[in-house]
Image (cartoon, grey):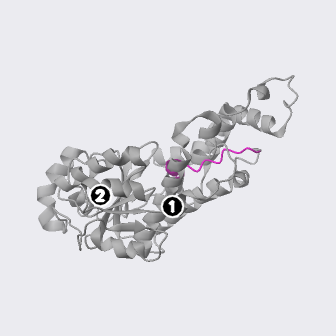
Amino acid sequence: QVYMADDLAALTAARVATTGARLEYTPDLPAERSGGDLDASGTLARVLPAARSGKEVMLLCVGGEGSMRMGANLVLNLASLGLRHMLLFAPKQEVCEGVWEVLPRVACVWQPSAFASKRPASLYNDAMRLFGMREFNPVALDFFRARKRLLVQLVLSQGLNVLHLDADVAVLANPYPLFKGPLLEHQLIFQTDNPFANAGVFYVQGVARGSGGAWLLEELNARIERFTFRPESVRELPHSGWSAPPHFANADEQANLNDVIASALIGERTFAAGVEFFEARFKAQFAPGHCWKAGAASYGSAECVSAREGKQRLGSPRYQAETHRARRSLRGGGGAGGG
């Protein structure tokens, strides 16, 4: 079901008294400048009382200094709705220090090690350096990966329900009467996006280890780690054995999230639309110019042969059907239902 802002506002008054949802959520133990380095032992457990309200917490994902204004705006937006149970996650301490200058009672954590890992060469990992594609900024890619690991800690290790939010979000009404009312039986509630769900705006509730919701979160993290650090493993997938280095190996959180959702609903693992389709697309898009010149000395190299194979597959109706079969079956009602 899709609910708009007006629906949320209308539901609030009717649901608060009967669902256990509250109009206001404040931290259990409010404190000023509560935060720290997640690489230090015990930081998360120490900081959480200043962020959580019972079993509820909002995880606000604020990028670098350029996102501080949007992050501060989101904090004030949520506070105006009575929602103050928030934990900011930032790439480095300086971002939290900047937020605390104007919002000292917001809990904020950072994790330098998340940005220190050396990623192997791949078209995905190196797209900004090689092709100037800013959407593949390495710091942003590391941040997306780190926030999903933190989410799993909050949900599975700390037993919390988490509202995960990008910084560039405006919340028009308190969503908790909806979460705790008509959607209470659902573990995972996503903002809709192409093709199914957005990886930056969603709510997780009542998820315990061993549950379907836990599988989805852990499987998403495993796929992001796999394609980030083992790009060659894309050749192990059913429709990508043709790929030769450099692989694209799409580790994007949203592309993989939607494949994981499709996997859960059809009852079998699929990587087809989020990883395999993009392997063909970007192998062809990023191929060196000489790969298309029959007389070039490197025309017959494995890289060039692979790029031309990718382009050929993109033009193949059969390949298009194979890589999008799972998602199309769900859109057409051919998939199994899920909670």
Question: Tag 2, which secondary structure?
Answer: helix
Judged from the image, the secondary structure of the residue bearing numbered disc 1 is helix
Q: Is tag 1's residue or tag 2's residue first in the polypeptide sequence?
A: 2
Which numbered marker is on residue 100?
Answer: 2
Query: Quarter-wise, where is residue 296 in the image?
Result: top right
Decide whether residue 217 is among the magenta residues.
Answer: no
Give the distance between the C-alpha atoms of the residues marked 1 and 2, in whole angstroms: 19 Å
The residue beneath circle 1 is 112
Q: Amino acid at mark 2?
A: Trp
Q: Is residue 253 magenta?
A: yes
Q: What residue is at 42 percent from the left and 50 percent from the top?
A: 63
Q: Is residue 336 left or right of residue 75?
A: right
Q: Tell me the chief SS of the magenta region.
A: loop
> Looking at the rendering, which quadrant does residue 127 occupy?
top right
- Percent of width and height locating residue 36: 40, 67
Which region of the structure is painted magenta? Answer: 245-256
Res. 153 image quadrant: bottom left
Q: Amino acid at mark 1?
A: Pro
Residue 275 x %, y %? 61, 47
Q: Nearer the viewer, residue 246 or 183?
A: 246
Rendered view: 51 above or below 287:
below
Which x, y percent locates residue 69?
31, 45
